[in-house]
Amino acid sequence: MNENFYGVLETRNIDRVQVGDLEYQTWYGNSLYFGNDCKTLGYKYSHLDSRLKKVVKKQPSDIWLDKLYVCGHCFKYTDESESMEEHRQCCKYATKQPGRVKYKDSQYTIRKVKGSRHELFTQCLCLFAKLFLDSKSIFFSVENFDFYVVYGEVDGRPTPMGYFSKEILQCFDENNLGCICVFPPYQNRKLGTLLISFSYELSRYQGIISGPEHPLSTFGKVSYINFWSKYLAHEFLYGRFRYIENITIDEIARYTGFRQEDVVTALESMHALRKVPLQDSPGDSNKFSLLVSKTAMEQWVTGKNVNLESLRIFDDHAVIFE
């Protein structure tokens, strides 16, 4: 597979981005912002005279552009500050956000944005997110995905702070999330947990056991293991499983909506899954049962200073399914 199609690069090629009034460094490279000359932004490159395209040489430097200006509402981009200022004065998404509200609390709103209906917005969103993701992401086939974008207020205006995508035509895996990204300035607000939780709320509404598409990005894997572990620790220490002595991995999966392999991953990360030899086969190491250790869970919660009280973030009126 041609990785350039996804914009994957071994090194960063854009040094910094200015999004609205915020400026910060990129984390990963993305070649899809540029034309074939690795110098000109794509929308400009497509309008270059064909003779100019032939004489422009590729830049040997890892950094192709010092600063990319990105609209904080629609994610359109340019390398000219004046052009971005002009655009910001008339961007329609600054006053009217795309999609329909699916979740709302006192701080944040999640809007469902159809890729088929808002193609340019979602393409630009994916392009921008790739600067902060180390795994592949969709860019052009957005019509096959729904995007759940979380908004919070910045200077009195609703501003996109992150999102996750979900494939419309489900396959055998029944993924409830394709790609997730919370933008750097907003990563200390537990928005990743909010988005992950919401993806499982959608799955529960559909009555399916589901989870994210693999492979996960580095930060995505950390976020998911942390989320699964907190949820399971809450259920075993204070929730439905508190007084249950015997339970199977399948029963845990059916109640939580987590895939069995994800349940095992979380329990192992807490060192809470033990192998116990079967009494009728004490000498056979291949025959054993799995024991969930609540003591190990308590040690994990205490050792990491985990606040399980903040786990549940939805109420009966916050999620809008229809």
Image: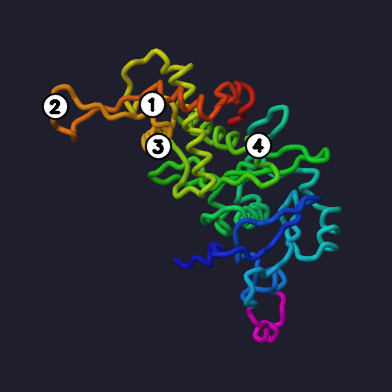
Disc 4 and disc 1: Cα gap in Å? 28 Å
Residue 196 lies, in percent from the top left, at 55, 36
Q: What residue type is labelled 3?
A: Thr
The residue that disc 4 covers is 110
Q: Residue at x 58, y 58 (%)?
A: 139
Q: Which of marks 4 and 1 is in front?
A: 1
Q: What coloring was used for the rendering?
A: rainbow
316 to 46, vertically: above or below: above
Please say if 209 is above or below 18. above
Task: Decide: few, some or many residues near mark 4? Use Cα within 10 Å; few <14, some 14-19, many ≥20.
Answer: many
Callout 3 touching callout 4 (CB < 8 Å)? no
Of residues 318 and 263, the one nearer the viewer is 263
The residue positioned 76% from the left and 56% from the top of the image is: 18
Residue 23: tell me if it is visible.
Answer: yes
Which residue is at 47% across, 31% downward? Answer: 229
Q: Which amino acid does label 2 sit on?
A: Ser
Which x, y percent locates residue 288?
A: 22, 29
Q: Name the residue under label 2.
A: 281
Magenta span: 47-58
Marks 1 and 3 sit apart, C-alpha to C-alpha, by 13 Å
According to the image, label 3 marks what residue?
265
Dot placed on the residue nearer the N-terminal end, 2 or 1:
1
Q: Is mark 1 on a helix, strand or loop?
A: helix
Q: Quadrant of residue 55?
A: bottom right
Left or right of residue 210, residue 133 in this image: right
To which residue does mark 1 refer?
A: 252
Q: Give the residue furthest to the front.
A: 303
Disc 4 marks a residue whose amino acid type is Ile
Pointers 4 and 1 in contact (C-beta within 8 Å): no
Name the residue rendered at 37%, 23% in the picture: 293
> How many C-alpha atoms fall within 10 Å of the one at disc 1: few (<14), some, or many (≥20)?
some
Q: Can residue 208 be seen in this view?
A: no
